[in-house]
Image (cartoon, rainbow, N blue to C red):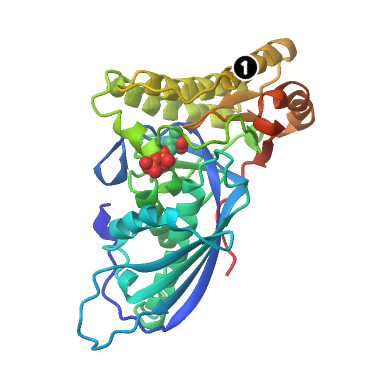
Amino acid sequence: MTESHFVPKPYSVNIESGTVTWSSPSNIALVKYWGKRKHQIPENPSISFTLSNCKTITKLGFTKRELSTGLEMIDDFSFEVFLDGKQNDAFKPKIQTFFERVEAYLPFLKAFHFKIETENTFPHSSGIASSASGMSALALCLMDVEKALMEADGAFSMTEKSFSEVFFNQKASFLARLGSGSACRSLEGPLVVWGEHEAVEGSSDLFGVKYPYKVHDNFKNYQDTILLVDKGEKQVSSTVGHNLMHGHPFAQERFKQAANNISEIKTILETGDLDTFVKLVESEALTLHAMMMTSMPYFILMKPNTLEIINKIWAYRNETGSKVCFTLDAGANVHVLYPENETETVLKFIKNELVAYCQNGHYICDVAGLGAENIS
Ligand code: DP6
């Protein structure tokens, strides 16, 4: 499959206005995406747990634009962005870039003025990336608009009255990826793979796919408690970090390792081998940060409290035999992962020993979930 699969046949714009609303969660990678080629193609496959509670809710209003003569070409996008009810121009450049990247696949984009109203369930300045949930929610809203337009235009055949669910999700994930790579893994759940890999049937560099194999009950409702170590803005954005993998001395080995880890995690997910899971997930987290530390220029996103927490988790595991482990994304916050049957004990441990290292004692309890929802 190539990108052209997602270029629609021409259809006319027969709807004057409307509103669609989607909620879409964040996700936490177990095997990390770090390094990409042109057009948001990942250098290696990745897999993540979709979250439940950390999500973005986006309402997209669209109104057909007036043309005075009907003949002039419109060569700009028209949109406004509201965060928590307040106009927010800081998001506009990212959305402008997103619109430019997806216009070839959504030919109606310049025909409408869009009002994008978005809110996150997690605090705005929590250091939790909102790009995965935000971009996936927006991509789903835009897919809904395309679906409505095509239905109104009679663009579907009598037998196929609309998009199939599979195509709708694939294209929405494809669009989300063009907004932010990891966003393509937020639409479904509890596990999503992005990036072509021979061991995962249907996997693609172009979009995320729901993990298609048997998953052991040990991973049911897997818990993720996010410890907010540093709520500030990151000094180095993910996009800059990805680019530093070009010409990175360890890049090729890292990409190979990630691909091997996808094969390995497939066995782990099937057998429910939590000890091997812990090793793989923590190694992935530390490798991600090792790549940052060995980039040129090098940088460190972990904070002293990130390391304090990691050491506490290791000590707790040694003492108790717990299967709790940590992972990190591109920041200082720590995601504490553990099986559902340890919820009570691990939460006690977190409250007693880890909360002290969180900024203002803040943390968020989340759990693997099923992905985005249409709440129009
Ligand atoms: C460390 O998806 O935020 O969280 O594609 O440039 O928007 P862009 O990057 P982004 O990178 C996320 C990287 C990561 C690992 C992961 O989620 O796989």
Q: Is residue 282 left or right of residue 68?
A: right
Q: Position of residue 327 (x, y in %)?
A: 55, 27
Q: Position of residue 364 (x, y in %)?
A: 67, 39
The quadrant of the image that shows the C terminus is bottom right
Q: Is residue 225 left or right of residue 277?
A: right
Q: Is residue 144 left or right of residue 215?
A: left
Q: Position of residue 200 (x, y in %)?
A: 41, 38
Q: Which is nearer the eye, 370 or 375?
A: 375
Residue drawn 42% across and 70% down?
A: 114
Q: Which is nearer the eye, 125 or 310?
A: 125
* SS under mark 1: helix
Query: So how many labels did they put on this image?
Result: 1
Q: Position of residue 267 (x, y in %)?
A: 51, 27
For disc 1, the neighbor class at 10 Å (few under 14, some 14 to 19, many from 20) is: few
Residue of label 1: 308
Residue drawn 48% across and 58% down?
A: 88
Q: Taking the image as drawn, is residue 164 in sight? A: no
